[in-house]
Image (cartoon, helix red, strand yellow):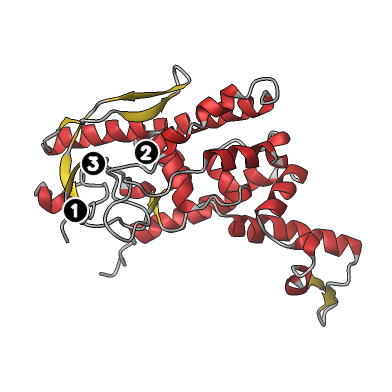
Amino acid sequence: MNSLYSSFKLDYTNPECDFLNINLDEDTPLFVDAYAMSRSSNAHMKLGHETLRFFMSETLVGLKNYIQDPTAINSLWEPKCFSEPKGTGIGLAKNGHKGRGSHDVKCQQITTALRNSKAVETGDLEDLEELLLVIEGIGSDTISDITLNISKKHFIEYTQEKCKKLNIPVSQTKEKIRYFCSVDKTWKSDKFDLPHLEVGLEKILSYLIFIPNEILEKNMAYGCNYFYTNVATPVYVDQNLAAGSSFIYSLKNGTKRVNKKEMRKDDKYKGGKKRMDNFISDNPKSLKEYRKTVADKRYKKNQDKKNPKKDDSE
């Protein structure tokens, strides 16, 4: 594999080499997990997540005032600010690296969905990753791209720090790179000193942005199906038990149970992002419950896979 580490002769056993070994020929199917950023011990990633939260806060304020002034939300969600990030080496591009003419984030679709979201209306949504639970058309690849675009300067600063420690040569980018500035509450662009290598099938010289392995996932901590199964379904079960519904059956010892398979055939208890949006607005504590229980367990499970514990007997 033509890779970042081999090109710069990096030693993968070096503790400082804790970032993705970018495949220079094609993208690696991994995504930036915003929840993992919030749990990271790396200062740049923590600041990156703070920027995400600030962006979401500004988004919610803009949505609240949308009728009187739609410019605020439109300036935050400018399509030109959400093109697929270059130089990261992650995503779903099948041929070469993305970032050159591949699909961009559909900002209008997202803002329209947010304006119609009951969870947004009731003020329950707070974090960017929560959009995965309620907005149709947003998957891991899209939320990863959004995360990278908003917090790009923090990833750039992380990259610059690694280059300095590992003696990786850098040069100024020819193009300006956009990022969201939480201090000035606006999008900015600038040129940065970054490492450059030839990427993709066409071997085009491109700047590179490093991403810590600890925040890269195939399956993010947040997911609508996980929310439905682990948070919404237990509530539906309790509702059916209390109502004495037709989905209830009894064990030999008299214990009452709910036939979840049959229950889920009823439209009232089916999953899906629209229904979970309504569920969250009706159950305001459900998002915090998911974050503290399900997301935390999924995060730890993902980290354990990356850092398997050695058998003490070895």
Q: Which mark is residue 16?
A: none
Residue at the far top: name it.
Answer: 184
Position of the N terminus by quadrant: bottom left
Between the C-alphas of marks 1 and 2, the distance is 37 Å
| Mark with earlier residue (3, 1) | 1
Q: Tell me the residue at 58%/22% (across/down).
A: 71
Query: Which label sits in the foreground, 3 or 1?
Result: 1
Name the residue beneath numbered marker 3. 208
* Total residue callouts: 3
Looking at the rendered structure, the kind of residue marked 1 is Glu
- Give the residue pinned by disc 1: 202
Compared to residue 183, the image places residue 240 above or below, namely below
Which residue reaches farthest front?
101
Label 2 Cα crowd, 10 Å radius (few <14 / some 14-19 / many 20+): few
The image shows residue 186, relative to residue 265, as above or below, that is above
Q: Position of residue 208 (x, y in %)?
A: 23, 41
Q: Amino acid at mark 2?
A: Ser
Lower sequence index among marks 2 and 3: 2
Q: Which residue is mark 2?
A: 41
Q: Picture quarter containing residue 112?
A: top right
Disc 3 marks a residue whose amino acid type is: Leu
